[in-house]
Image (tube, grey):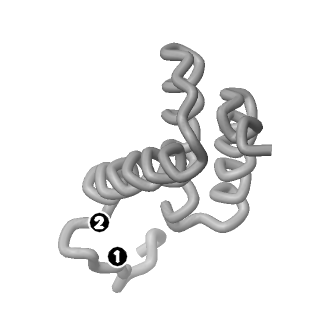
Amino acid sequence: MEGIWAIWWLWLIAALVLGIVELLLPGFVFLGFAVGAFAVAMLLLNTGLALTLPALLLVFAALSLIAWLVLRRVFAHPNCQVKTFDHDIND
């Protein structure tokens, strides 16, 4: 059962599921996890490494954190403020 986590397409399916969850519950929380799972899938596919489950989870966590920080930096509103409108578009 330990070797099942080293299959690249399982991580790709996890990335797809997390991406769909992000569409249903927006907020850039699950998108970072989806990018991390996709990166682990590409790492396993391209390198063929046989890492243990704790090592894979550590790589997944690190890549997800980096992806989340980058996404937050790119897509966050300046000063983390919500944009409000004081006038009607038809005025």
**Callout 1 environment at 10 Å: few (<14), some (14 to 19), or many (20+)?**
few
CA separation, marks 2 and 1?
A: 8 Å
Q: Quadrant of residue 41?
A: top right
Front residue of 29/85: it is: 29
Q: Quadrant of residue 50?
A: top right
The residue singled out by tag 2 in the image is 77
Query: Which secondary structure, mark 1?
Result: loop
Q: Is residue 28 left or right of residue 65?
A: right
Q: Is residue 67 above or below residue 90?
A: above
| Quarter of the image that includes the C terminus | bottom left
Amino acid under disc 2: His
Query: Which secondary structure, mark 2?
Result: loop
How far across and how far down the image is residue 76, in percent?
A: 32, 62
Contact between labelled residues 1 and 2, with CB atoms less than 8 Å apart: yes
Which residue is depicted at the point 34% across and 85% down?
Answer: 86
How far across and how far down the image is residue 85, in percent?
A: 37, 80
Question: Which numbered tag is attached to residue 83?
Answer: 1
